[in-house]
Amino acid sequence: MTEVAAPITEIRRPDLSGKRVARRYAAERRFRAYGLTAIFIAVAMLGLLLVSIVSKGYSAFVQTYVELEINFDAAKIDPDGTRDPAKLAAFNYQGLVNDALYAQFPDVTERRERRSLRGLIGNSAGIELRDMVLADPGLIGTTREVAFKSSDDFDTFVKGHISRDLAEADRRVKDQEIAWIDALEADGQVDVRFNTTFFTTGDSREPEQAGIWGAAVGSFLTLTITLLLSFPIGVLAAVYLEEFAPKNRLTDLIEVNINNLAAVPSIVFGLLGLAVFLNFLGMPRSAPLVGGMVLALMTLPTIIIAARAALKAVPPSIREAALGVGASRLQTVTHHVLPLAMPGILTGTIIGMAQALGETAPLLMIGMVAFIVDIPGGFTDPATVLPVQIYLWADAPERAFVAKTSAAIMVLLTFLIFMNAVAVLLRKRFERRW
């Protein structure tokens, strides 16, 4: 035995084996380095994207205001002294704002200069004064300090997005307007406040008046329809395919098609909604009802696949124990299997809803790209959603809409992160290890 073992030891050649081991270790180190490099590049790109969005969008959360001394002249607003709401509402309150500006800068007398001076204040100033007077007629005959939203150019300049060092021909704010702004700031009449309008109003052609509330309500109504349709249908389909359907060519074909539908581009579902829901069924265009139905079709495959995976994760012993004590197949599924699989089903549903929240292409096809000012009050009212609102603002020419676009992206990302965090918490909270 000893004489046979000696040649084998010589054939193994320990020096070559050591080299092979060293090469394997070196290859493993290179593989780890490649993986770490890929992760670093991905994190760096994500960080660069987030920094770009935040740096452009943070300024949209504040708004520049200009305080003016408004004389609510009773002789102009209500010469008869009747305080009739109809007459008070019909008065041109923008004239009071203009008079306050002219009194602030009495040396501005030319028509063109006065037009530029009036452009420092947002177009909603007259409406704000009208609402104030209608809410409190006691203001008539008094003089008050009132803060108005500045124009988008004024606001952009104060926030530093327009440099005064540029040549006058290269910037929207001219030298004379900068002098007026400096004078207002020197008098303490310029103030930067939190922009509540961004969260409480709908879309507008004027950047200082535009907000995301209309799009947020539209997204909520649309996702409500999506959830009401996709969740029960998806869960029932998954339960039938996993627990009751016979294994044959038909069910195999259905499973293949469900998996394929999960990879279909979302715009195809938009074309389906345009052809069926709008053109054939005549349903209202640009409505959350139709948008929710289209997104439900897109979300169904995701929910079905996630629900089937959750049902498969339930051990067969649970089913066998329930059947062993006399439960029917339906009772076994409804009382034992489905409750145990529900955390995984909810996780998949939330992920599918988060995907639906960020979709734009299918909703563009059914008309939800329309300019909607009013806040939708129901499922059939014209509406838009946050991703489409971002798309509309990104195409707007005004510089102030750049900040609005990035700020809306930040809000949308916050919702998506929140929904994914809820999915992770549900999975961790209700996860069972068998």
Image: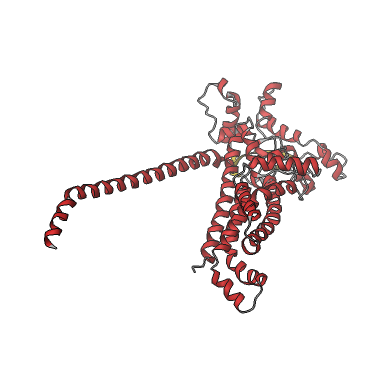
Q: Which residue reaches farthest left?
A: 3
At horizontal 64% and vertical 44% (from top left) the residue drawn is: 386
At horizontal 67% and vertical 24% (from top left) the residue drawn is: 108
Vertical placement of residue 431 versus 290, above or below: below
Place of residue 88 in the rendered image (x, y in percent of width and height, measured from the top left): 83, 42
Vertical placement of residue 102 versus 220, above or below: above
Determine the image quadrant of residue 316.
bottom right
- Asked if residue 147 shows in the view, the reply is no
At horizontal 69% and vertical 52% (from top left) the residue drawn is: 226
Which residue is more in the foreground, 201 or 162? 201
Where is the N terminus found, in terms of image quarters?
bottom left
Place of residue 417 in the rendered image (x, y in percent of width and height, measured from the top left): 55, 51
Which residue is more in the foreground, 221 or 80? 221
Number of numbered discs present? Answer: 0
- Asked if residue 84 shows in the view, the reply is yes
Place of residue 326 in the rendered image (x, y in percent of width and height, measured from the top left): 64, 78
Name the image colouring: secondary structure
Place of residue 58 in the rendered image (x, y in percent of width and height, measured from the top left): 54, 42
Residue 18 left/right relative to 363: left
